[in-house]
């Protein structure tokens, strides 16, 4: 079960654990190639900006195929996908078709490795780690850089969220990974060192960095806090203090919701969900260790093989509109990427931004990410 599906199921059942947004198509997602074969057609003359778009030379609407991870579209009441499709098609003379292979972006990487046709025009849900994986695996570009001036709202994206030095990915939202804790059971420490205090023995649940995007983000935050030479010693300290490592976010949050530990690694927007579903706020306190949280922005990019360049650029510009940014943030329970979105009042009260956002750049992670996670697996997970 993907993270979004877990949230929806929990919400329908009225159970605890209704928290957090979706971090996208990272390593929390697994599964097999679905072999989706959505077809795309060319012929759009849409231009960037708030155009309504028209099709010239064809009597049928054009089709824009957008690849993404399944939880972006599989919950009509809360996922952004269905709303985006309806809103987009109401304004553009084009059909938006979602393509959600079970193994997410890996599906498209495998098709390019096998010289198979890629039918999608845009992918939604990229992060820095994915771009590194693409560039390590493929000799030919999977995504094309956004041409200068192609997006009328490109300058509205916060510069702090830019994560692609090659100009392919356009950020559309971001999440911050931090501690969520139950104040009825404990008081979360304020620093990383505080987690090593024997008073917190057995109180923390984290996700496995080798199988979870959330866990990987927490691992990277420990690398940032303790340095490349010190993070493994820090994790040995966590192990000595009986930290519990589970496979993915869902596993970890289920255990936390069941009262198996009073602290879990999750998202700084968890209280938005808690408020939305009338969950006890005491069980959803937020702690930024060292006054920091790890930022993990999500982006979108146009496939290099797409013939629908104008339609793809028009879609990305549409996603950057203030009202669309706000709706994605509400439904995905993340923060918008632009400076122009106006969020509802619940975000001002319950979505917490850290005093300092921490993240590694593409260049810092390239060549180091696998080394850090492999070293963690050898030193920690295998014992």
Image (spheres, rainbow, N blue to C red):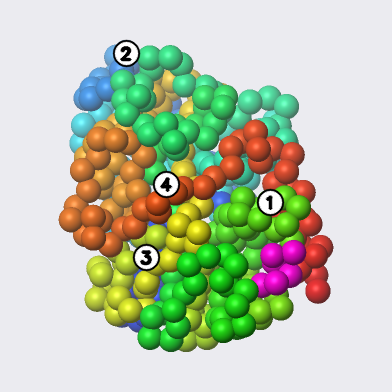
Identify which residue is drawn at 46% across, 44% down: 297
Residue 166 at x, y percent in the picture: 57, 24
Choose the circle earlier in sequence order: 4 or 2: 2
Q: Quadrant of the C terminus?
A: bottom right
- Alpha carbon separation for disc pair 4 and 2: 39 Å
Q: Which structural element holds mark 1?
A: loop
Q: Is residue 319 above or below residue 80?
A: above
The residue that disc 1 covers is 227
Residue 57's label in the rendered image is: 2
Above or below residue 134? Residue 258 is below
Q: Position of residue 320 (x, y in %)?
A: 32, 33
Q: Earlier in the sequence, mark 1 or mark 2?
A: 2
Name the residue nearer the viewer: 17 or 74: 17
Mark 4 = which residue? 174
In the rendered structure, the answer to whether residue 216 lies left or right of residue 249 reads: right
- Is 359 located above or below residue 240 in the figure? above
Residue at 68% across, 51% down: 227
- Quadrant hosting residue 311: top left
The magenta-colored residue range is 233-238
Q: Which is nearer the eye, 332 or 33?
A: 332
């Amino acid at each position: 079960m993907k993270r979004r599906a877990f949230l929806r199921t929990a919400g329908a059942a009225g159970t605890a654990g209704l928290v957090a947004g979706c971090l996208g198509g990272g390593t929390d997602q697994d599964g097999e190639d679905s072999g989706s074969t959505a077809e795309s057609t060319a012929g759009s003359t849409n231009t960037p900006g708030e155009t309504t778009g028209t099709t010239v030379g064809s009597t049928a609407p054009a089709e824009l195929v957008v690849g993404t991870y399944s939880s972006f579209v599989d919950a009509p009441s809360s996922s952004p996908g269905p709303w985006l499709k309806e809103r987009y098609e109401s304004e553009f003379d084009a059909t938006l078709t979602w393509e959600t292979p079970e193994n997410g972006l890996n599906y498209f990487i495998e098709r390019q490795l096998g010289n198979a046709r890629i039918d999608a025009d845009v992918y939604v849900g990229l992060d820095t780690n994915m771009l590194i994986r693409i560039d390590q695996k493929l000799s030919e570009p999977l995504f094309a850089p956004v041409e200068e001036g192609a997006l009328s709202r490109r300058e509205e994206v916060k510069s702090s969220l830019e994560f692609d030095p090659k100009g392919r990915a356009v950020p559309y939202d971001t999440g911050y990974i931090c501690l969520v804790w139950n104040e009825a059971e404990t008081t979360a420490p304020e620093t990383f060192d505080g987690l090593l205090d024997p008073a917190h023995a057995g109180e923390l649940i984290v996700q496995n960095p080798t199988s979870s995007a959330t866990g990987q983000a927490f691992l990277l935050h420990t690398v940032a806090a303790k340095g490349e030479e010190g993070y493994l010693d820090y994790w040995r300290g966590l192990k000595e203090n009986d930290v519990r490592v589970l496979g993915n976010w869902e596993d970890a949050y289920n255990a936390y919701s069941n009262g198996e530990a009073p602290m879990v690694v999750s998202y700084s927007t968890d209280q938005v969900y808690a408020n939305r579903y009338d969950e006890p706020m005491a069980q959803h306190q937020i702690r930024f260790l060292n006054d920091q949280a790890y930022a993990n922005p999500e982006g979108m990019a146009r496939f290099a093989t797409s013939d629908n360049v104008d339609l793809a650029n028009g879609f990305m510009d549409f996603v950057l509109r203030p009202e669309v940014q706000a709706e994605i943030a509400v439904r995905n329970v993340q923060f918008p990427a632009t400076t122009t979105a106006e969020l509802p009042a619940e975000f001002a009260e319950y979505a917490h931004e850290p005093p300092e956002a921490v993240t590694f750049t593409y260049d810092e992670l390239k060549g180091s990410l696998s080394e850090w996670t492999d070293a963690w697996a050898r030193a920690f997970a295998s014992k």
